[in-house]
Image (cartoon, rainbow, N blue to C red):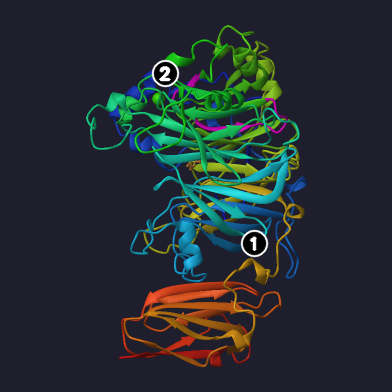
Amino acid sequence: MSEKHVIEHVDPIEDQPADTGRRRFLGAAGMAGVAGVGLSTVLAGCRKETPAGTEGGAPVDDQASAASHQGANPHLKPGELDTYYGLWSGGHTGDVRVLGLPSGREIHRIPVFTKDALVGWGITNESKAIMGTRPDGSLKYTVGDTHHVHASYRDGNYDGRYAWVNDKINCRVARMRLDTFTCDKITEIPNIQGFHGIFPDKRDPVDPAINYTTRVFCGAEFSIPLPNTGEHADEVETYRSLFTCVDAETMDVRWQALIDGNCDLVATSFDGKLAATNQYNTEMGAVYENMMSVERDACLFFHVARIEEAVAAGRFSTIGDSKVPVVDCTRAANADPATALCAYVSVPKNPHGVNASPDGRYFICAGKLSPTATVIELSRVLDWFDGKLDDADKTIVAEVELGLGPLHTAFDGRGNAYTTLFLDSQVVKWNVDAAIRFHAGDQNVKYVVDRIDVNYQPGHINASQSETVAADGKWLAVGCKFSKDRYLPAGPLHPENEQLIDISGEKMVLVAEHPVRPEPHDFIIFRREIINAKPVYDIDDFPNAVKDAAESGVTRDGDKVTVKISSVAPIFGLRDFKVKKGDEVTVIVTNLDKIEDLTHGFAIEKYDINFIVNPQETASVTFRADMAGVFWCYCTHFCHALHLEMRSRMIVEA
Ligand code: CUK
Ligand code: CUA
Ligand code: CA
């Protein structure tokens, strides 16, 4: 690709599904062969050798059409605001990024599972209480791996209250408040490992008055012995995984469902009745060859109301020390639709990603090792539970070829789906209704609308307002796992590449890209009007607030010392304070400034402490004063012309 974004389009008429050959090579036989001769080369980020869609018809260098539709300008003039927010998982940095779109400017990072020295996340008592500590007061966990961020719904659209994100490493689910863009609760899910997919429900399945999110569903990707006490470690075939429901408000774990196979991604229906997870390891293998040994895996649909009835009626068990009710969603226990809590729908080999179309009708599973997407009609899934359909696989209304390595799907609200093709390094735009008609036998229907090269090996994809009733089909963002040659080299670690595509027209147009520190996975994009951000905290929300500069001072209770300090630019309420070596010191700082954007910091030299207090916010730290001497405390956040002079002294007496 040249520096100028050359846009290659494939003539949709030529590039139609029947092309076998390369697109089929990841089928059963192909895969078996591949596995022996360098699977990693094929499945990892191999450089793309063939231009877009060569095998399905010569690529059309569509300069003429690109000229007539250049794509909207994503660049904003200085001072202009973006029209969309993006919430992006940070990946194994353990945080969440907040972007403005279409500019792609990073506005904020929300520290969640890992320490953050700017905010003092994992340093202040308040953040440590959210993150969880060991008996000695240290953080229970210090690493995290965020993959999926999803926000709370009301009437099928985001309502700006909350967003949730997973930690795959330590099986935690975190909630963020979207008025302050801060994490306010973290729950560790019991009995699982590899917590991957997450999705809030969109309304209650029973009570029509509850038209908003009250549950968050969480999928466990890895199976483990249950309980995981060190016994039965060698009996891999007995390992199991669980699908978990967390209460959106209390963040308590409500129930878990024991399943066969594993969970990957999670999706929920707009009517609140169904939650689903795609399964790539129905084989329940412990090594990759075994995980890809069968031709079809599954998408598992949970009947939320029936599960909650079972829990209410006491039809559950528990695992080990955990008190969480566990219902039986294994295959054998759910063969009878009349009583089934879940339905297993078979989908091709090792699917990845399950996404809900914004019209509320379909879930789409991307094939990954199969070059297909499977469209499952939700009304038919309900029909199966009602005994009106004799086979759960009859819920499949289309299974169509898209290209190599389909992973995730986004929607434009006009009936089109956009699926990333990891191996082809493309995004394919396809029409869902047309795919259904093609699958039904009308071979003349062209369901692939457009293809575009992306750079390179895309994973997640999302469109503005995609999985909401307000899907608006304006912007598509693509998270490319490999950036290769797109940026100046900066050592062996390459950034990932995020690309922005204008999808307002028939053809997709690549309009911008930026590097990003590895490695984000999923993200959502929504209208800025949805957010009602708080510019200044309410001082009364903090029970320990130092409400007046005159309240600043030191109190002692045995060897426990409390130091209260107000901050008003450029003055701390105490110019110095004395403690004794060996004291347990708690420093409480309140920012009494009421002006928007006037944040103070509080750092203590040599004591490894720094945190910020935003306007009208209070935060505290507790530490052992184990070194005698004079230690400057200073404001780390530039707040005033006399910011450098904004200091105090901690004097630790020997
Ligand atoms: S997974 Cu990362 S590209 Cu964790 Cu959502 Cu598909
Ligand atoms: Cu207060 Cu800088
Ligand atoms: Ca499999």
| Residue type highlighted by circle 2 | Glu
Q: Is residue 481 visible?
A: no
**Residue 399 magenta-highlighted:** no
- Identify which residue is drawn at 42% across, 18% down: 295
In the image, is residue 3 above or below residue 234? below
Position of 321 compared to 387: left or right? left
- Identify which residue is drawn at 65% across, 45% down: 152
- Identify which residue is drawn at 36% across, 22% down: 283
| Residue type highlighted by circle 1 | Thr
The residue where tag 1 is placed is 180
In the image, is residue 342 above or below residue 629? above
Total marks shown come to 2
Q: Element at badge 1?
A: loop
> Which residues are the magenta region?
346-361
The residue where tag 2 is placed is 295
Q: Nearer the viewer, residue 543 or 206?
A: 543
Residue 4: x %, y % from top left:
61, 55
Q: Nearer the viewer, residue 167 or 346?
A: 167
Residue 534: x %, y % from top left:
70, 64
